[in-house]
Image: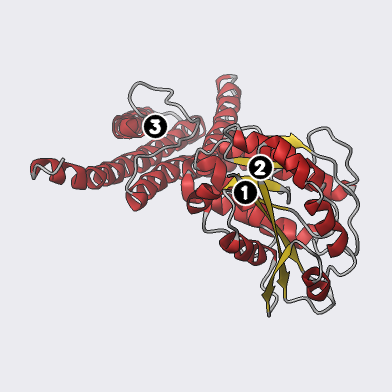
Amino acid sequence: MTVLSVVIPAYNEENGIKEIAERVLAVGPALKMAGVERLELLVVDDGSMDRTAEIAENIPGVRLIRQPKNKGYGAALKTGFSKASGELIGFLDADGTYPPEYFPQLCKSALNGSDLVIGSRMAGEDSEMPLTRRIGNFFFANLLSILGRQKVTDSASGMRVFKREILEQIYPLPDGLNLTPVMSTRALHEGLKIEEVPIPYSERVGRSKLSVIHDGRIFLQSMIWTAMSYNPVRILGLLGLGGIGLAGLVFIGLLVVRLNGVTTLNPFGVFALFFALVSSIAGINMFALGVTFNYLISLFYKKPIRQGLFGKPFFKTPLDQQFGWMGLVSMLAGVVIAVVALTLGVNGWEIGRLWFYLLGSALLFLAGIQLFIYWLLLRVLEELSQREILTRQDMGLG
């Protein structure tokens, strides 16, 4: 028998809790048609200072769970998850913004194989969401799509259904309003099957507890740090490639100018030159650091690296294994250019004709050193990652 446990976190929601609870209970017959035999409704009172708990306790069919102190939206949900008995767990807010009438559709998707089903407020249904929050949700959804390499339209929806068995994979989750974007981020990086079902969104009953600026900042930080704990090269690598690309464009422009006979730079040219130097070295370091962090994560979890910069290899030999020869070639090129420039200078060339090549020599040599050092570090980490496996093989333990 399939059971759906619906959790409603409630904090000072005396004006809306009765209506939303009764609407949830009313979808029982429709749930049976979707394949869910029984509905369990849990209201978690998160230390309310009004009559929320009293009202909820007197609603037939509601199981009330009290938290004496206000611990936060996420903490209330996790309390409900721990008390739920269903194979499927759903949740929605107590303010009437989400339509419980769509639970049968979400459950049908879960029963058809999806691990996490999100009611998307941004996927085409009528929505009364304020413009500022719509813009914020659009930004966070696209950010998550970039970080997780899977299209998501609503990363922070507060109406979902998921299989109880995935809790171990998506925990830990935060206690605050950022539980939903962190859940989405973890689910994507854990390789869970996510599906979105378009739902309408209504204007809430009472005053919103969400601060666009404060909570938006927390959402952003939570998503970035969660993604970094799974696949740091996705973030650091993209930033690093961006820095290297910008530096490359600047150096190409300066080279064209130099080949046209211009040996002096105006203030903008000098600024561009130093920007390119900083951008290139910083880009190389960020890219290599992201690769290194991925190795460290694989050591921590004792699992092979599951993600990467683009999700699939672009080279037959992984790029990080080529850092060694790339670094040596870069250093050698830097030395050769420096020797040629010095020879030309000894033979009478003015420094105004040589400074660009000397600068390029220094950049190549510094970049080469960075690549070679990271290559050494990555080889040590690779050796450590294989140590336990090889030891077990040598001891005949499989």
Asked whether residue 44 appears in the rendered view, the answer is: yes
In this rendering, the answer to whether 38 lies above or below 335 is below
Image spot of residue 123 (x, y percent) = 78, 34
Q: Earlier in the sequence, mark 1 or mark 2?
A: 1
SS at badge 2: loop
Nearer the observer, 5 or 256 = 5
Nearer the observer, 201 or 342 = 201
Q: Which label number is shown at residue 14? A: none
Asked whether residue 279 appears in the rendered view, the answer is: no
Give amino acid for label 1. Answer: Val
- Residues at discs 1 and 2 in contact (Cβ within 8 Å): yes
Give amino acid for label 3. Answer: Gly
Image spot of residue 204 (x, y percent) = 89, 56
Query: How much space separates mark 1 and mark 2, taking CA atoms?
Result: 6 Å
Disc 1 residue crowd, few under 14, some 14–19, many 20+, Cα 10 Å: some
Q: Which residue is mark 3?
A: 345
SS at badge 1: strand
Query: How much space separates mark 3 and mark 1, taking CA atoms?
Result: 82 Å
Q: Is residue 4 left or right of residue 11?
A: left
Give amino acid for label 2. Answer: Val
Image spot of residue 161 (x, y percent) = 66, 46
Q: Earlier in the sequence, mark 3 or mark 2?
A: 2
Q: Which residue is mark 1?
A: 3
Q: Which label number is shown at residue 36? A: 2
* Residue at x 34%, y 40% (from the top left corner): 304
Query: How much space separates mark 3 and mark 2, taking CA atoms?
Result: 83 Å
Disc 2 residue crowd, few under 14, some 14–19, many 20+, Cα 10 Å: many
